[in-house]
Image (cartoon, rainbow, N blue to C red):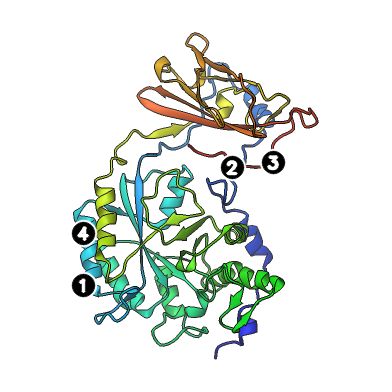
Amino acid sequence: MALPYFMRTRPVVHPLLLAFGLLICAKDENFAAKPQPQNTKAAASPAASAPASSPARPTTKPVVDQTAQVIIFGYHRFVDNVRHPDTEITPAAFEAQMKELKDRGITVIGMQDLLAWKRGEKSVPPRCAIITLDDGWKSQYEVAWPILKKFGYTHTMFIYTEGVQGGHFGGGQAITWEQLAEMRDAGVDIQGHTATHQDLRKPYDKVAKKRLSPPEYEQWLQNEVAGSKQLLEQRLGVRVNCFAVPYGFYNQHVKDVARNAGYEAMFTVYGQPITYNAPLDSLGRYLIEANKPKVFEDAVKMISTSSGGGGQPVAEVATTNLSTSPADGETVRTALPLIKANLSAIGPADPGSVQLRVSGLGLVPATYDPKTGTVAYQVTQKLREKTCTVILSVKSGGKKIEAHWTFGIDETGAAASKPLSPTPTPKK
């Protein structure tokens, strides 16, 4: 028997879930912040006793192809007799589309692979696709899943919790919690899509059929975004770190609530190829509709002919190995700092490939001394932002290497050398 609405929608805050949410990180500055490196001075003391014949090697991240591109498809219901072409597609058409991905050499990857790539933790093939199924229809379990298994494709389910059988909108065509658990056990990724699938910008609860006061709206929005996430995690024992916005409708406040709830990425319905630097708070998906077959064709054509794939991979080197000045996380007293780094630790560098970019200035005319390995640039016009990002790139041993670091500026001197609060370093 379904629980009363006020019991189903009351947000549940559990200490373990709160702690769990703290583990989520993201590259984009609008969503979960990436932690800053540890204090290297304390970590350096054990190395001081190491033999002189064993110099420290630079700590590098995996080589990641930043030129790869990903397209994300979104589906709803799978029926033989299409009556609602905006949300339905025939099984035959769906299978033909899945086959076309394989025929065109487009690799289907999982959602967590996409996020790991955007965090710089792993590479993905040059041309990829992700399959997502929205809402939680029974046909997704009975029709779409067998077709996806036939091709060996993984996929993500974006579930709104009141749409599961037993929920307020969970009728006979809805998926069950037991079916979701079976899919979870088989490796299907299950993510959030609110509690009741409403326009989150509007202070109106279509379940209670009432307009909401500002305090009521905030409580309702918390339940839609955070409460539904907690329910999925509790019922299925999964980690929910992705959020698909109903209808693609959102504003900055919705983004903020999703970020604070612990989501790593937010997805819309405005399809576009996803690049390495695409913001995590508005990743577009191509929604496939029976009456608009050209949407699928155009998306596949776009990524198939894109020059994005096959570019040169980029490796990142930790700034602790480059003796950067200002140091990563440092706050300086001048808006005209001398920016320096030492490339000796990465090996022989191609002098002509050295480039230094400074936020607010772009590419700057830095000097490079091959004898000392020092790259330097004296800022000549005041940096206007209180936080400055530096991106240093160079080719060494046939590989392109990048280093990113951030420092603060406080000309009052009150916070000189004070570490910055944790803020993510944007990847350019």
State the CA–CA distance, disc 4 to disc 1: 12 Å
**Dots 2 and 1: beta carbons under 8 Å?**
no
What residue sits right under mark 2 in the picture?
A: 424
Q: How crowded is mark 3: few (under 14 residues within 10 Å), some or many (20 or more)?
A: few
Q: Which amino acid does label 4 sit on?
A: Glu
What residue sits right under mark 4 in the picture?
A: 100
Secondary structure at badge 1 equals helix
Residue 122 higher or lower than 256, as above or below: above
Q: Residue furthest bottom?
A: 1
Residue 359 higher or lower than 247, as above or below: above
- Image quadrant containing the N terminus: bottom right
Secondary structure at badge 2 equals loop
**Dots 4 and 3: beta carbons under 8 Å?**
no
Question: Where in the figure is residue 45, as x and y percent of width and height?
Answer: 67, 26
What residue sits right under mark 3 in the picture?
A: 421
State the CA–CA distance, disc 2 to disc 1: 45 Å
